[in-house]
DNA sequence: TTGAAAGCGCTAACAC
DNA sequence: GTGTTAGCGCTTTCAA
């Protein structure tokens, strides 16, 4: 007496389908994978049996035997900040047709956690890995390098990729924003950001920003950091603090759009003249901004496109150089005053 | 001549670690899994060799041999609407210490896609599945039932679960909100929602809402649906449409907080007296609301708690009845006028 | 077009 | 404490 027929709760195997259809396991396997030539009648018998039993193939056994895993590991710092979901959309879009499946892991901006997530993912022998950022522990880098699969580091290109990189230059983005602000005539500029020692992209933007200020003989007149809580609310609070501490500040540069939006709402509440008395800018280009009473200046981080390009590299649809640089567009919105007529 | 030493790019196996350390494969396996007794010196030798080689275990082989997979499938409709990331946080929090790992799949509210995602996940033989909602195709339900693992359907409890369910009654939530609105004296009430035939939770809320209106001898004076785009912006647009079409409307009930927030910003822009002339309410209790100029009335969907409870069931930390009902709290915020003193 | 045998890399179960 | 043996459920390879 065989297990399967006597135990209705037994997990089905190819063997069960084989017995039910009177066809060898090998042929059943071929039918279910659409591989090799199988006669239409055999094919029908097999599909019928599989359907009737409710057979779900065991990918673990399949992967072990074929040494092929249709998984792509995606390692990102967070899901709750509006930027990575869109990257995921781009990745899914491209992977859709390829038979590859994204599997996400979240690190919460912690290098140790990232190392663990990468280790766990690699232990499933995925076909490729997409990892946010260029900064990783030595162990993480070593594991990825050794894995023998395509690795794409995304979001950032200011640094040395392990294999491929797709992203923007955050340093340049910061510089460009500073230049636009200066060109618009603002001079007393403050920075407001979330306190994230491991958010290297935000750090690089700030570095680029200060670099450009320095070149114009300026420096930040104030800076304020916060962490945790509702970004919109934090934006309000930080803005209140800065306006209070440095009343003559004339521009507020935020490390992301959410806190920038909070700041904007605060300034409007207070009846401040935006962008006349004070200008504001954020970063990311999140769609949220479209619903605000006034449109916050920002730079699009090319999230969708980064996801797409990264997935294309993994899927082998693109064979570019090691680095793919994208160029974010500055969207001045309604919170940077137009550049005055002459220079 | 063996493969490994001759090919530095070969993926390492237990055998390689075994040879490098002079210890049997079995003992190496024990060390790497912290299973069984191994002498400290052997242990050290093995760990040393594994580290030096950069060995990453092959979970595929391990899972096949042990018939154990430390994965929990999580199937949700979307990642971009602020509600599921928090559910994920709750799940991760609880799973953290158990050795189990969540793997998410996104369905975009499409039943066909859900079926495929479930099929793919089950083919990896996870230890449990967490699936959003109680409505699934017959095939999906059959697969889940047959899988022989704990299944937890989350978010909703208005219906029959396959195995376990953790969530709130959206029908009751809709009813409660309607009752609060009526008690506050509003009578000309409109509904504004996103057009999502497969968002069964939103549908049930609306049903409960209309039920309670009917009981009070009322019915909706207007309704408006939209889909796609920036929720905040859509909220503004829909609100404009409704206010224009039904000028004497005195309450706007939104299917979620984001469009409600858009509506609130619109009403404030227009200088409408909120909550005097017109009241508003949303649903979810997203933290975003904390940063708005006025706090939108809402009901907390218990997202974090749902994630936690679901994960506890999967992890075997809780063995409750089939349904775990949570009770959302109505938060009147600043957009429902206080109930008048008497009767 | 179909089937039989071997084995993917690991672990359970049992020796020693 | 450590090693040996026999698979896990599939696919590869080769034969018919």
Image: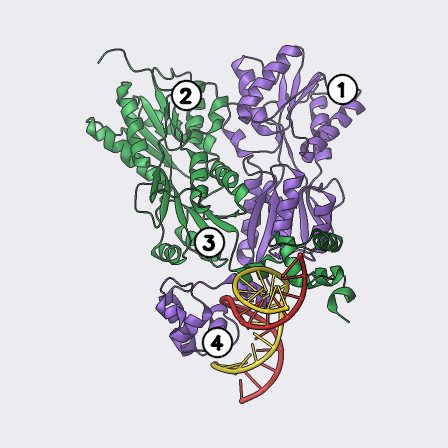
Chain colours: A purple, B green, C yellow, D red
- Residue for badge 1: A219
Q: Which quarter of the image is occupied by the C terminus of chain B?
A: top left
- Image coordinates of residue A238 in percent, x first then y, are 60, 19
- Residue for badge 3: B117
- Image coordinates of residue A101 in percent, x first then y, are 55, 54
- Frontmost of labels 4 and 2 is 4
Residue B152 shown left or right of residue A157 in the figure: left
- Frontmost of labels 1 and 4 is 4
Question: Which label's residue is closer to the chain start, 1 or 4?
Answer: 4
Question: Which label's residue is closer to the chain start, 2 or 3?
Answer: 3
- Residue for badge 4: A27
- Subunit bearing disc 3: B
On residue B267, the disc is 2
Q: Which residue is drawn at 54% across and 50% down?
A: A93
Q: Which of B147 and A263 is in front in this view?
A: B147
Q: Distance between the residues labelled 2 and 1?
A: 40 Å
């Amino acid at each position: 007496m065989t297990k399967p027929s006597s135990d209705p709760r037994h997990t089905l195997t190819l063997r069960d389908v084989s017995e039910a259809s009177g066809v060898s396991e090998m042929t059943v396997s071929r039918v279910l994978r659409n591989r090799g030539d199988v006669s239409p009648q055999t094919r029908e018998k097999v599909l019928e049996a599989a359907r009737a039993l409710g057979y779900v193939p065991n990918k673990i056994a399949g992967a072990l035997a074929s040494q092929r895993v249709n998984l792509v590991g995606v390692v990102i710092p967070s899901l709750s900040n509006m930027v990575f979901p869109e990257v995921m959309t781009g990745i899914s879009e491209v992977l859709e047709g390829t038979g590859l499946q994204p599997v996400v892991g979240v690190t919460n901006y912690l290098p140790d956690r990232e190392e663990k997530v990468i280790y766990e993912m690699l232990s499933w022998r995925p076909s490729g890995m997409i990892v946010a950022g260029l900064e990783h522990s030595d162990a993480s880098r070593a594991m990825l390098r050794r894995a023998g699969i395509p690795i794409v580091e995304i979001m950032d290109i200011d640094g040395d990729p392990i294999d491929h990189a797709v992203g923007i230059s955050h340093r340049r983005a910061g510089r460009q924003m500073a230049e636009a602000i200066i060109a618009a005539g603002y001079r007393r500029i403050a920075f407001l950001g979330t306190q994230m020692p491991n958010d290297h992209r935000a750090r690089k933007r700030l570095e680029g920003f200060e670099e450009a200020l320095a070149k114009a003989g300026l420096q930040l007149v104030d800076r304020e950091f916060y962490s945790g809580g509702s970004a919109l609310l934090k934006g309000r609070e930080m803005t209140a603090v800065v306006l209070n501490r440095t009343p003559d500040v004339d521009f507020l540069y935020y490390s992301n759009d959410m806190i920038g939006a909070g700041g904007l709402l605060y300034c409007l509440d207070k009846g401040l003249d935006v962008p006349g008395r004070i200008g504001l800018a954020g970063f990311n280009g999140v769609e949220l901004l479209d619903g605000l009473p006034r449109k916050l200046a920002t730079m699009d981080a090319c999230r969708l496109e980064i996801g797409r390009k990264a997935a294309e590299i993994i899927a082998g649809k693109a064979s570019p150089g090691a680095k793919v640089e994208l160029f974010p567009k500055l969207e001045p919105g309604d919170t940077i005053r137009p550049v005055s007529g002459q220079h």
